[in-house]
Image (spheres, rainbow, N blue to C red):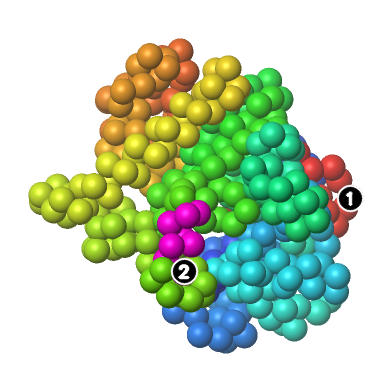
Amino acid sequence: MKVLVLNSGSSSVKYELWETSPEAIAANSDTLIKRGNVERVDDIDQALHTVFDDLGALSVDAVGHRIVHGGAKYTASVLVDAQVEKDIEDLGELAPLHNPHNLAGVRAAQRRLPSARHVAVFDTAFHHTLPQIAYAYGLPFEYLTERKIRRYGFHGISHRYVSWKFAELHGKSREQYRLITCHLGNGCSVCAIEYGKSIDTSMGFTPLEGLLMGTRAGDVDAGAILHLITQDRQSPLEVLKMLNSESGLKGLSGVSNDMRDVQKHAAAGEPRSQLSVDMFCYRVRKYIGAYLAAMDGADALIFTGGIGENSPEIRAQICSKTASLGISLDAAANTAKSGEPRQIGHGRVPVWVVPTQEELLIARDTLRCILNIPHE
């Protein structure tokens, strides 16, 4: 089956065309046929026109769509129907930078490929196994039961893939491991995966909570937000925009949301950029320590995502001052350039870099959904 994977964002559409089958999944021999990225997107229909121009005469049997927020309802990938579309739309207020654009991509692709099967693959689904002690907030209980105010978690597609890949490399299943996975890119999150199940993760009700990110603030005292609204007279929408789009590395450094740019300015002695790098690494290290406590240890620490895979300096700074936790990097292995999964630390908690392949997992889930095959 030829599966087109679409990741429709606010300013770009990433796409990959995969050929997969149950046999290919079992043999890990799925074939990537084509990939591309349409940038500076103003009109989603025009963007998909560009996608299909690139695909040419290649056929498409199904389309897998990355959807960021599936709420508590969607614990696995599903075929898209009118109800699924409505639910994605309703959840847009919880992921305003993502869900509306994801849904626009679904609808545009349906217009372009009305006879294809369309599948929604949710970033939140992997985290449906969080226990209540991890997903509940300390608010009056009815906020949880009636308003569904809780931690949902994100980047689940990536955390799920790298945990599977790590186990596959060892000839075992992820149900045999306790893993801490760090997805570090423009968006960042850490996940504690205990014997195959996500039991805690740094992102929460929205993708705002947790680590310092490219443009997101991460953890902030709610009282500080209320102060901005009640005392500084900023509107909730202004504060929401600031937290999502003007904070993080970008807001702290005043330079960029791109860690590479911030690192260059830090190396040149710019103190705000150095503070941004230091805060970024410190927060990741804190969550790693917390999840080692939550699982009473770990069998591996895994880095993935654009920063996690490609910045040995950031990995080294995160893993500094962790010797007592059993984490120790091999300097040569950490700095060696490779696009392959590899071990870079040999302490009590081995450290790995495992490149993520979210699009491959989306293609596989799309096939499984259509054929009614259990997800892995």
Mark 1 is on which residue type? Asn
Residue 111 lies, in percent from the top left, at 75, 83
Looking at the rendering, in which quadrant would you find the N terminus?
A: bottom right
Relative to 332, is 101 on the left or the right?
right
Instruction: Please name the residue that numbered disc 1 is placed on.
Output: 372
Q: Which residues are magenta?
A: 222-230
Res 318 → quadrant: top left
Describe the element under mark 1 as helix, strand or loop: loop
Around disc 1, counting alpha carbons within 10 Å, would you say few (fewer than 14), some (14 to 19), or many (20 or more)?
Answer: few
Which of the pair 85/42 is nearer the observer?
85
Judged by depth in the image, the label closer to the viewer, 1 or 2, is 2
Looking at the rendering, in which quadrant would you find the C terminus?
A: top right
Residue at left offset 46%, top offset 69%:
229
Could you tell me if the residues under marks 1 and 2 are in contact, i.e. CB atoms within 8 Å? no
Res 322 → quadrant: top left
Instruction: Please name the residue that numbered disc 2 is placed on.
Output: 230
